[in-house]
Image (cartoon, rainbow, N blue to C red):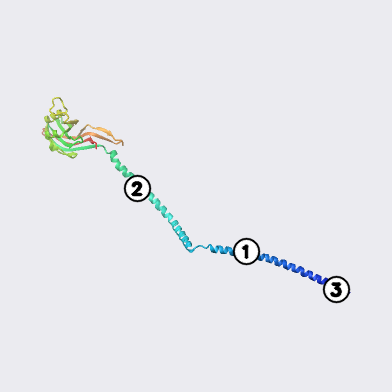
Amino acid sequence: MRKSVFLLVVGFVAGFAAGVFVWQRAVVGKLESENQQLSGDAKKLAALTEENTRLAGERVDPAELKRLREGQAELLRLRGQVPQLRRELQAAKAEAAAAAALKSAAQFAEAKPETNDPPVDKFTVEVTAQVGWHMAVVTGGWRLPSGKRGFIFLQPTDMGDGTVHVQSHVVALPENLVASLGLEQLKSDGKTSNGSRIFTAEQIQRLIKGLQKPEGSEILEGEGEILSAPRVVVLSGNRAQIGVTQVHTLPSGQTYTTGPVIDVTPTIATDKQTVELVVGGQVNLPRAPR
């Protein structure tokens, strides 16, 4: 019986010891698991600490942060000015286009006279003279591009039926011949004339014959020339136009004329011994080269 009790005690002790051993192993396993978890947490904490340290070292310098903020503010200001700058650019383009148009117009206006201005000199006369039937009136006296003096001779003839035949001569005379003929008082340095002088028909005919240079002429060759000799028959009191002109065309297509155009209105006096000549004339001659 004692042996049975002993065995029972031994079995109890052995079972108790085995239970304690199993419990210890469970506790140790749990502690090892918790230790591993704590070790992992410690590593994470260390990593976080290291990252925090790194981030703390990378903090932006206050001066650099201020510069960046100022730069951003300037960028925003410039963006706000973009619409205004675009409007100013458009206005500048419009002004430039207008200026170019004005310049082009000015250049065209400057060039136009050179292109379209007829290359002629215009000489005019306005005179009224009372002339006998066997007399002639001389007017003009301008200095022509050739250097000679230009005159207009007008000789009226009574046709007996209330009409008047008017023979004109447009002549160019050198200065020495002007003086010898007594025409110095008619000389004009401008391009207009309103003076006149009366000559006999015989004097005019002798001068014209001399300018035609027939053999035996008392006037030397080359001293003067007849530019034109148009004539007309007109009823007393009426106006007539006499002239011989040539038409020229500029490169622009514009035309102009050269030669004399003379408006004359003869009115026979009531005594039929004289005739009043109202003369308005223009002589267009090619302009001298410059």
Given this view, does label 1 or label 2 mark the residue nearer the observer?
A: 1
Q: Residue 60 or 159: which is nearer the viewer?
A: 60
Type of amino acid under label 3: Phe
Place of residue 157 in the rendered image (x, y in percent of width and height, measured from the top left): 14, 30
Q: Is residue 67 above or below residue 249?
A: below
Type of amino acid under label 1: Lys
Label whose residue precedes the other's in the sequence (1 or 2): 1
The residue under the point 88% across, 75% down is: 2
Q: Left or right: 25 with respect to 161?
A: right
Residue neighbourhood size for the residue with mark 1, other residues' Cα within 10 Å, grouped as few (<14), some (14–19), many (≥20): few
Type of amino acid under label 2: Ala
Label whose residue precedes the other's in the sequence (3 or 1): 3
Residue sitting farthest toward the top? 215
Q: Quadrant of the C terminus?
A: top left
Q: Name the residue beneath numbered marker 2.
A: 99
Q: Residue 229 or 267: which is nearer the viewer?
A: 229
Q: Left or right: 279 with respect to 47?
A: left
Q: Name the residue beneath numbered marker 1.
A: 44
Checking the image for residue 6, the label placed there is 3
The residue under the point 85% across, 72% down is: 8
Whether label 3 touches label 1, CB < 8 Å: no
